[in-house]
Image (cartoon, rainbow, N blue to C red):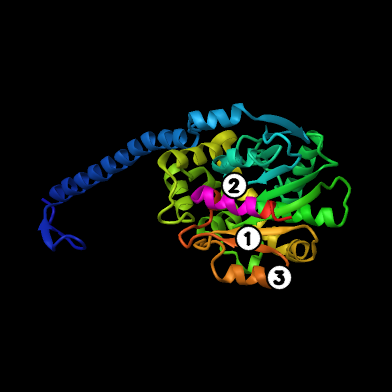
Amino acid sequence: MFPPLVLTGARSRTCLPVDAHYKVQAAEWEVELRMKEWWIQVGLIAVPLLAVYLHIPPPNLSPALYTWRSTGAFFTYQEQRIFYRDSWGAVGSSDVVILLHGFPTSSYDWYKVWEGLTQRFQRVIALDFIGFGFSDKPRFHRYSIFEQASIVEALVNHLGLIDQKVNLLSHDYGDTVAQELLYRYEHRRQGHINIGSLCLSNGGIFPETHHPRLIQKLLKDGGIFSPVLTRLMNFYFFSKGIGEVFGPYTQPSETEYWDMWTALRTNDGNLVVDSILQYINQRKKHRDRWVGALSNTSVPLHLIYGPLDPVNPHPEFLDQFKKHIPKSTFTVLDDHISHYPQLEDPTGFLNAYLNFINSF
């Protein structure tokens, strides 16, 4: 017989025979082995599920979104297909308006004011910028405000409007594209469009008063983690983030959230969001160029502003606007209107814009 063995550590100090000790140790090894097998089984189930999740196809288009796309068309810019809509409207008018949408949505942002605009303008035109909506969304592409402005110029040329005055109505990201177009117009750059007026709305035209959301900061500066974040993006996080920039009484419906998400997911748009977000850095780099274009222009300018906007907060943003662009007029909507005024208060937005257009 072997002498009793003293076990110490996590167990109480107990004298056990050697064969009993081995039985205890064997039982512990068996438990550890079962735990390892359990984690392996979990992994075998979870990994395929995660792979399926990360490659889940985009949702089907709603009837409204399907109609929006089917009544539009595409043109090609440097081998990329760009979606646009071109509606003929008011008889007897020769005025044209081009609508420039924001981030991260699409031309569908304008659907609530579209009919009202067609009653005033001969042609109402909107496009999905490259990387947005139904347009192509190339991976590993250097998205820039300059390219988006060139795409607008190419569309105007494609539609045979290069010599005609056009009115620009923009929102958010589209404001910055409009600023670059205005700069080119004022400097008579080759291929510039002939701008008759410009109306901005709730865009980060001043980097110093622009407050991007946390997810935008993470994606634009995330480095190697950005592609992971874009793949993990889902409807829940998207709708929660978008909802934060709408007013508490003007939240999108579930259907509207899904339409926004579907337009983003089309052509795997979620995978290029981090690349597009470099526009925030471009705004800082080219601030003098783009703010200067607004300050020095002779083109009629107007701003429609939702004052509850957390991205361009009141009164900080409006004070800067009045300071740097004193010749511009502006309309401040009701206190509960936030970052998407054309969706939150389409009637107020449309009335403000038509009052501006009819004032000159």
Q: Residue at x 84, y 48 (%)?
A: 192
Residue beneath the point at 49% across and 38% down? 259
Percent position of residue 176, x then y: 69, 55
Q: Is residue 85 visible?
A: no
Q: Earlier in the sequence, mark 3 or mark 2?
A: 2
Q: Is residue 345 magenta?
A: yes
Let me know if residue 78 appears in the view: yes
Is 214 a magenta residue? Answer: no
Determine which quarter of the picture holds residue 13.
bottom left
Residue at (87%, 57%) from the top-left corner? Answer: 187
CA gap between label 3 and label 2 equals: 31 Å
**Apparent side of residue 288 relative to residue 128 in the rendered image (left or right):** right
Q: Which residues are magenta?
A: 343-355
Q: Which residue is mark 2?
A: 273
Residue 102 drawn at (x, y percent)? 61, 49
What's the residue type where badge 1 is placed? Gly
Q: Nearer the viewer, residue 317 or 197?
A: 197
Q: Amino acid at mark 2?
A: Val
Query: Observer-nearest residue: 311 or 296?
Result: 296
For label 1, the residue is 204
Left or right, 227 with reference to 285: left
Considering depth in this image, is 306 or 58 the residue closer to the camera?
Answer: 306
Residue at horizontal 57 percent and vertical 36 percent from the top: 268
Q: Residues within 10 Å of mark 2 (few under 14, many from 20)?
A: many
